[in-house]
Image (cartoon, rainbow, N blue to C red):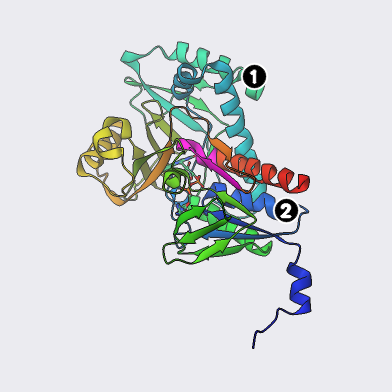
Amino acid sequence: MVNSISFWQKNNERNKTKVYIIGGGLVGLSAAYFLSRSNLSLEIHILERGEVCGGASIRNAGFACFGSPTEILEDVNLHEVEKTQKLIQKRWEGLKLLLMMVGDKDIAYHQNGAYELIEKNENDVDEIIKAANVIVSDVFADNQVFREKQLPWLANDRYSCIYNDLEGQLNPYKLVRAIQDILRSQGVQFHFNIDIEHIDLENNQCQDIYGTQYIFDKLIIATNAYTKDLLPSAEVMPVRNQVFVTNILKNLEMKGCFHVDRGYIYFRNIGHRVLIGGARNRFPETEDTIEYGNTEDLELFLLHRLRDLLPNHKHIKFEHKWSGILGVGKDKTPTVRKINDHVYAAYKMGGMGVAIGSLVGKELSDNLIVDIQNE
Ligand SMILES: Cc1cc2nc3c(=O)[nH]c(=O)nc-3n(C[C@H](O)[C@H](O)[C@H](O)COP(=O)(O)OP(=O)(O)OC[C@H]3O[C@@H](n4cnc5c(N)ncnc54)[C@H](O)[C@@H]3O)c2cc1C
């Protein structure tokens, strides 16, 4: 005999719009956050192939940054001034939104500022500071965001240092966990170890690798670097970033987020350890890949670079290493797309997803809410 659904369940669930979100990184979580706070009657499910989150959102360096001066100047060549300013504005708004979302939850956020180290013989630092300040002055209503600073531990005869006190650092794992906790309390349902293989755009359903089907009213694809697998038209390219963490360094003086080589190399303190990562521009033959892994060449390159940058520490070695996959493209503006009346996607977060991910998630949520209200 067929067991009918109860009156109670039917009346509670009848009018709910079923929203599935593929991808439980910062973008998917942020979309769920804003959807769950709307006054619409939604049933929100996150389908995630990892155990907590399988993507960059728990593998990143935890820089809460909007761009180093030379990176910003390089962006101007790529995007022109106005678009670069918009991008910086979005990253800055995204950071503020993210901190608002997590409220008083512990994400180990410290606003220790950010630094760019510039080799003296190759560059005119005053020119860089002046030009970068012109670009960001409108965004921050301040024409002295970047300024030169002497660091007692740095080889100041070889490096100049540009500082700003607006940027911070956080613990990406704690961040993802904090948002997950908030979402659970809002009734969002998580489904981990679910690997979606195919989306049937005609019939509003997707299917995982075991053949289980998920029928949706609305679908959000928040799979960033992996989006092409589900949406072949997506213009996003996966590239790897390797990350290393040192042993505990006695009397470590450095504190904050540091950029070298236009942001391609980054390092920060984690307590008395140093995290360093990047340098994919130096090793394109191995790093233009979607495969996880670490390579000896890149590891040695970063180890030597760190020893050079921290000459007071004679016994630096790496004790932890991992990698993550970035979603990049021809430019640095994230793509937020409506695929059809039921399916939305966002990808191409680049190396700034911590900053911009919350805002992109909100944009997805806003688009979907407006469409439901107009139906
Ligand atoms: C090593 C590294 C360091 C970085 N450092 C910083 C930094 O310091 N500051 C900063 O702002 N940004 C940094 N980034 C970039 C930032 O981490 C990303 O831009 C951001 O996390 C992207 O968020 P997302 O939600 O779009 O993607 P992701 O976090 O990658 O989330 C996508 C999710 O989708 C899931 N998924 C994919 N395909 C499927 C499927 N078919 N079925 C089910 N689930 C699926 C994945 O498992 C993943 O959890 C770094 C990135 C890397 C790799």
The type of residue carrying mark 2 is Arg
205 or 122: nearer the eye? 205
Q: Is residue 351 magenta?
A: yes
Q: Which residue is mark 2?
A: 37
339, above or below 196, in the image: above
134 or 348: nearer the eye? 348
Where in the figure is residue 163, as x and y percent of width and height? 50, 26
Q: Nearer the viewer, mark 1 or mark 2?
A: 2
The alpha-carbon separation of the residues under discs 1 and 2 comes to: 32 Å
29 or 191: nearer the eye? 191
* Mark 1 residue's CB less than 8 Å from ligand 1: no
Residue 336, quarter of the rendered image = top right
User: What residue is at 76 percent from the left and 47 percent from the top?
Assistant: 375
User: What residue is at 52 percent from the left and 16 percent from the top?
Assistant: 80
Could one spot residue 254 in this view of the protein? Answer: no
Number of other residues with Cα within 10 Å of mark 1, as a class: few under 14, some 14 to 19, many 20 or more = few
| SS of the residue under disc 2 | loop
Q: Specify the quadrant that holds the N terminus.
A: bottom right
Could one spot residue 233 in this view of the protein? Answer: yes
Q: Residue furthest bottom?
A: 1
Question: Count of labels shown?
Answer: 2
Q: Which residues are magenta?
A: 343-355
Where in the figure is residue 329, as x and y percent of width and height? 43, 32
Number of other residues with Cα within 10 Å of mark 2, as a class: few under 14, some 14 to 19, many 20 or more = few
Horizontal placement of 316 versus 61: left or right? left
Q: Is residue 3 magenta?
A: no
The type of residue carrying mark 1 is Asp
Where in the figure is residue 213, as x and y percent of width and height? 52, 64
Residue 138, numbered circle: 1
